Image (cartoon, helix red, strand yellow):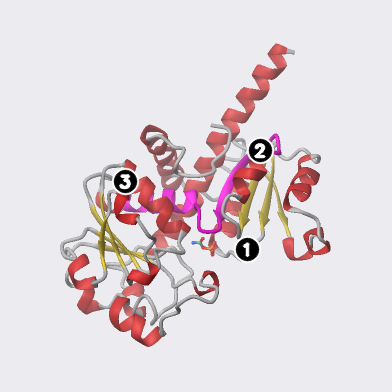
């Protein structure tokens, strides 16, 4: 493929190929100079129109560890503030001939649109409520390494499903890999018709967590609730926050995940998040660098191949 826009477009074999490569990056000390030739001579531009800690930092580190020239656009200080459109900004940057464009944008579909206008590889770093493909891939790698497989697992995704691109990408990826997915959360935060996607829906944590292998918690995304119902944090934690009592209904070796940023005492008890016997939250961050290295490595191979073919045709 030319771009990484979403999990929706990926075939299970492509997911496995990417995870296998990410595994090797995770195993062979990703820091240092060992892989500097992979993206040598290529330019990577990171455009984040929404806040980010993990995704932006790990894309930057991944690019640098693979030898790319990495530029972070400070979108707060860009001409977007003077009324320039996303497409005009993208075309301007495209004229500077980048090879890899990493984009986060608050509007669903904005990254797909941008990918149609530029002639470099585009990686979706999260667009609105639509997709966050590298997050789902790093979650998959974390699960595969912890559980030894990525199929026939019982996986609970809990909380604010309606506003979550992380949930959407994970539901697609974990479904493609033939896992059993349960969504647990208040009916007000569950997308309409989600039951048609081959998932089981619960509004009770104790029932939903029975016997699961993986518990994936999500943040309450208040910034996307524009005027709609916002539950009180106390009440929400009482009913849907992950604490020891609720976790005791999952399998004894169930792992606990959270994509971050995490609100302790709202969707997860801080003691559970910090319990190194259960929580793989820091592992997820570590796998984020390896997965982004693998994604950019594979797209760069395709880009170089396409350019070689073009030069042969000319
Ligand atoms: N999980 C995630 O996307 O985190 P950031 O918003 O910090 O990048």
Secondary element type, mark 1: loop
Between discs 3 and 2, the one toward the N terminus: 2
Q: Position of residue 288 (x, y in %)?
A: 48, 54
Q: Nearer the viewer, residue 285 or 76?
A: 76
Q: Quadrant of residue 259?
A: bottom left
Q: CA distance from mark 1 to mark 3?
A: 28 Å
Q: CA distance from mark 2 to mark 1?
A: 21 Å
In the rendered image, the residue lying farthest to the front is 193
Q: Quadrant of residue 100?
A: top right
Label 1: few (<14), some (14–19) or many (≥20) C-alpha neighbours in 10 Å: some
Q: Give the residue at mark 1.
A: 50
Label 2: few (<14), some (14–19) or many (≥20) C-alpha neighbours in 10 Å: few
Name the residue: 61% across, 23% down: 305
Secondary element type, mark 3: helix
Q: Is mark 1 within 8 Å of ligand 1?
A: yes
Q: Give the residue at mark 3.
A: 175
- Residue interval drawn in magenta: 117-145
Q: Is mark 3 within 8 Å of ligand 1?
A: no
Compared with 235, 294 (above or below) is above
In the rendered image, the residue lying farthest to the top is 313
Q: CA distance from mark 3 to mark 2?
A: 28 Å
Q: Position of residue 56 (x, y in %)?
A: 60, 58
The label on residue 116 is 2
Please report contact status of discs 3 and 2: CB closer than 8 Å, yes or no.
no
Q: Quadrant of residue 274?
A: bottom left
Q: Look at the image and tell me whether residue 32 can be seen.
A: no
Image quadrant occupied by the C terminus = top right
Secondary element type, mark 2: loop
């Amino acid at each position: 493929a030319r771009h990484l826009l979403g999990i929706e477009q990926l075939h299970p074999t492509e997911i496995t190929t990417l995870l296998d490569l990410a595994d090797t990056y995770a195993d062979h000390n990703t820091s240092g100079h060992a892989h500097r030739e992979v993206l040598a001579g290529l330019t990577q531009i990171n455009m984040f129109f929404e806040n980010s800690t993990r995704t932006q930092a790990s894309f930057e580190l991944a690019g640098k560890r693979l030898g790319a020239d990495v530029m972070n656009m400070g979108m707060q200080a860009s001409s977007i503030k003077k009324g320039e459109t996303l497409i005009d900004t993208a075309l301007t940057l495209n004229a500077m001939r980048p090879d890899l464009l990493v984009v986060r944008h608050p509007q669903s579909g904005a990254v797909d649109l941008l990918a149609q206008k530029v002639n470099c590889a585009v990686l979706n770093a999260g667009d609105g409520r639509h997709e966050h493909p590298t997050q789902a891939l790093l979650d998959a790698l974390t699960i595969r390494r912890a559980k030894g497989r990525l199929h026939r697992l019982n996986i609970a995704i809990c909380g604010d499903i309606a506003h979550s691109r992380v949930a959407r990408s994970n539901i697609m990826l974990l479904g493609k890999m033939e896992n059993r997915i349960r969504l647990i959360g208040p009916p007000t935060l569950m997308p309409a018709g989600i039951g048609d996607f081959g998932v089981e829906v619960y509004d009770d944590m104790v029932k939903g967590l029975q016997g699961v292998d993986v518990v994936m918690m999500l943040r309450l995304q208040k910034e996307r609730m524009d005027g709609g119902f916002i539950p009180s944090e106390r009440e929400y934690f009482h009913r849907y926050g992950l604490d020891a009592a609720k976790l005791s209904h999952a399998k004894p070796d169930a792992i606990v995940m959270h994509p971050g940023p995490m609100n302790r005492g709202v969707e997860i008890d801080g003691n559970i998040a910090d319990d190194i016997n259960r929580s793989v939250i820091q592992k997820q961050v570590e796998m984020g660098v390896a997965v982004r290295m693998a994604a950019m490595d594979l797209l760069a191979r395709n880009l170089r191949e396409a350019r070689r073919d073009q030069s042969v045709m000319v």
